[in-house]
Amino acid sequence: MAEEIQIAGANSNAKIRNPLGVLGLSLITLGIYFFFWWYFINREMRDLGQARGVDLGQNPTNSVLAITIGWLVIIPGIVTEWNTSGRIQRSQEAVGVNGTASGPVIFILLFLISPVGIWYMQSELNKVWRTQQGGGAEPAAIPAPEGQPAPPAESRPEVPGA
C-alpha cells in the first residue's frame, strides 16, 4: 500500500508508491490505473509547486486529457509526456534532491520503453516525497525571504558505518 505524506506548505498529500506496483496495476487494469496515476502525480507536483512558488503545472486534468484523448492527434500525448518528465526533474530541484532525474531521459524511456519509463518516473518522484517526509535524500534548503540572508545549514551527526 502507498504511504501518504503531507506536502510541506500545502493542504494536500502525496503518495510514495511502489514503482512496480504502479506498473503492475497499470497492466492488470489494462491501462485504466495508469490514467488515474498520471492525474495524481501531476496533481501532487502541482501542489508542491504552489507550495514552493515553482511552476510545476496548473491543471492535472489537462494532462490526463492529453494522455488519453490527445493521443488521437498524437501531439498532445507527446507534449504531456515531455512536460510531466520535466516537472519531475524540477520537483527534485525544488526540494533539493541532488539532480538524479533527467527530464529528457524520463521522456525517452516513457516514449520508447513505457514500462521502464513508468517505473523510473515513480522511483524519481518517491525521492521527492521522501525528502518532503524528511528522509531518504538530502533535506531541502528552505529559501530565505527576499532581502534576507539564508539561514546557516544545520550540521548533521555522522552515522557510523553509513
Image (tube, helix red, strand yellow):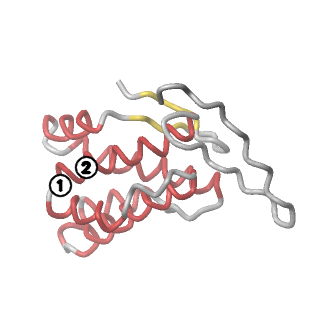
Q: Residue 150: x, y in percent? A: 79, 57
Element type where label 1 sits in the image: helix
**Residue 88 placement: quadrant:** bottom left
Residue at 26 percent across and 70 percent down: it is 78
* Residue nearest the viewer, comparing 150 with 119: 150
Label 1 neighbourhood size at 10 Å, few (<14), some (14-19), many (20+)?
A: some
Element type where label 2 sits in the image: helix
- Cβ–Cβ under 8 Å for marks 2 and 1: yes
Relative vertical location of residue 44 with respect to residue 82 in this rendering, above or below: above
Instruction: Name the residue that disc number 2 marks.
Output: 118
Q: Residue 117: x, y in percent? A: 23, 53
Q: Amino acid at mark 1?
A: Ser
Instruction: Name the residue that disc number 1 marks.
Output: 114
Q: Residue 8: x, y in percent? A: 63, 41
Q: Quadrant of the N terminus?
A: top left
Residue at 32 percent across and 60 percent down: it is 65
